[in-house]
Image: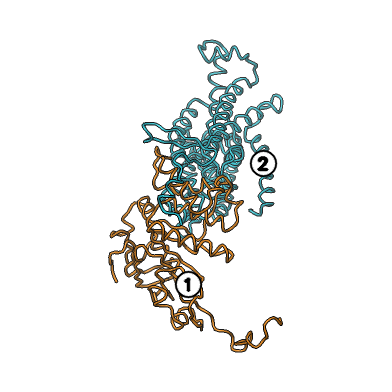
Chain colours: A cyan, B orange
Amino acid sequence: MQTPTAIRALADENFRPAGQGLVTAFDGRVSVRYRTRTVAVCSVLLVLAVGCVFLELLVGDLWIAPRDIWSALTWGGEFASFIVMDIRLPRALAAVMVGAAFGASGAIFQSVSRNALASPDIMGFTSGASAGAVFMILIMSANHAQIVAGAIVGGLGAALLVHGLAYQRGAPGGYRMILVGIGLSAMFVSGTAYMILKADLDNAAAAYTWLVGSLHGTSWAQVTIMAVALAVLLPTAGFLGGPMRLLEMGPDAASALGLSVRRLTTGLLLTATLLAATGVATAGPVAFIALSAPQIARRVVRGSSPGVFSSALMGAVLLAVSDVAAQRVVPNTALPVGVATVVLGGGYLVWLLIREQRKNRV
Amino acid sequence: MSANGTRLNATELSLKYDERTVAENLSVSIPDNSFTIIIGPNACGKSTLLRALSRMLAPARGVVHLDGADISSYPTKEVARRLGLLPQTCIAPDGITVADLVARGRYPHQGFLRQWTKEDAEIVSQSLRQTNVFELASRCVDELSGGQRQRAWIAMALAQQTPLLLLDEPTTYLDIAHQIDVMNLCADLHEEGGRTIVAVLHELNQAARYATHLIVMRAGKVLAEGPPAEIVTAELIEHAFDLPCTVMADPETGTPMIVPAARARSRGRAAEVPLGSS
């Protein structure tokens, strides 16, 4: 039998799980551990996201040369400046920010419920937020800030209902949460349909375009609200994202490691719901980004779970690319971005279902 | 018995799941530095007791004391630095490596800006070696055999470096060789580090062989507790499990060995058949 001293001699003070890096500062008092591959993938995605913003600036009915776009961005003053600064730039920024919000939100839902199918769109949070927003648009004829508030109230209401109905013995059950969510989602969708049926034609058409998910006519006011929300919610999600990984080992194992499971779960679900709701308020319930971005990110990163930041960046790139495609695929007809994401994400979902079924997981 | 000075003890616990009462007025104390094994028939409340001792389940009445104070008065991370628990069902996240899993055991000792110290590195590599999974460190947990996987989970609990370690049925689902392997590991860990280990077990003979302190439960009550050699009798086992049996000395260790009584018709049959005739 080994004595404790012998064991200490065997121990390695430089040991680290393979594929992980370490940054230390202040004589080892500050140490941050990271996965090398995650950092590399996130850097590439960040560059791609910035690239997407520039690509969006190029796209539109009117061709504006990159040189003119650059001068509009830097000193403005010309005709191009109006199109670039007031139409295309807000739209481009909204695309990456809404994508990031949906991506991060989906990562949290999938991690907390330990299910790749969990995402705010499937679990009814998005349709709750949509119902809230449509109510504000049609019944209250609200301005943008009020629509945001309506979406948040609707999203949180849906989250509370799902959480409350799916709660079992002190821990939220994964499958239960999804099933309850699908049921509630159907109810919200029919409620929204009823409101649209009762509205007059113009308003109904506007609400409907919004429901498909559209970035058309995004204003600076919307971009500002979205930016403020992300500035608060993304760091929160990142902060909770570390302990979130421990939750995946099951509530018992996580709390044995010193996690307050209930408090952490509540914090995570609240953050994820707010992310989804602000995204919905800005661009409508753009489908499938929250579902597919975390899963694609997870596969690229080769991690054990969808990370918050990699999923957010993946969501930003996916939504921006979808938006460019939606504007360009059919000549002279700018489709709402939701159409593109449904095609992209729907195909992905079918592939995921087939794959998971082969693994006997669904 | 109330708080009698051991690091972990429970006084007059009333344990309930929703409305179903599992135990009333249950008191136990875990002797320091013991390898305590809790046995009892299914649904006797042994796992529930373990959950209460590790503050997974809040008792409806009564108190669990950890180091002299009510366990619920500690911050959760502080409990996790004193008491480790390996639950019955653990889920390894998809594609996680053994080293990464074991490193998670350091969570209660880490902070947001203190994620990996030299101490963490030493303890994780030491835990990997102690449980004999160091060579598997960069393998995925889902690729391992049942026995290796259980070793990896124990390594994670070990990396928590707690003086108290609670294991809920650590050998269930393992074949007999791996069961003995895990029990030997627990006994080593108990002898080496001056740790107190508490395990819930189904296998009576393993319990009697490895425990330094045995707790026998039935229907939410402790029937007997003490060193196996002093308390295990045919009457006690029959009372606890409704199982008529004979108790004899384990030929390997001299500890009590429980042999269930045979059906009346097959009793002595083997003796009538000449050896080698099968």
For disc 1, the marked residue is B253
Image coordinates for residue B113, horizontal then vertical, percent: 40, 37
Question: A135 or B172: nearer the eye?
Answer: B172
Please tell me whether residue A347 is drawn above or below residue B257 in the rendered image: above
- Give the side of residue A206 with respect to residue B123, left or right: right
The chain ID associated with circle 2 is: A
What secondary structure is found at the residue carrying circle 1? Answer: loop
The chain ID associated with circle 1 is: B
Image coordinates for residue A89, horizontal then vertical, percent: 55, 22
Based on the displayed image, in which of its 4 quarters is residue B63 positioned?
A: bottom left
Image coordinates for residue B110, horizontal then vertical, percent: 40, 43
Pointer 1 with pointer 2, Cβ within 8 A: no
Q: Residue A357 carries which label?
A: none
Answer yes or no: is residue B205 visible: yes
Please tell me whether residue B201 is drawn above or below residue A188 in the rendered image: below
Pointers 1 and 2 within a single chain: no
| Mark 1 Cα-neighbour bin, 10 Å: few <14, some 14–19, many ≥20 | few
Image coordinates for residue B136, horizontal then vertical, percent: 56, 48
Residue type at the position of mark 1: Thr
Question: A39 or B99: nearer the eye?
Answer: B99
Answer yes or no: is residue A286 visible: no
Residue type at the position of mark 2: Tyr
For disc 2, the marked residue is A348
- Looking at the image, how many numbered discs can be counted on the residues? 2
Distance CA(mark 1)–CA(mark 2): 60 Å
Question: A267 or B85: nearer the eye?
Answer: B85
Please tell me whether residue B216 is drawn above or below residue B244 in the rendered image: above
**Mark closer to the observer (1, 2):** 1
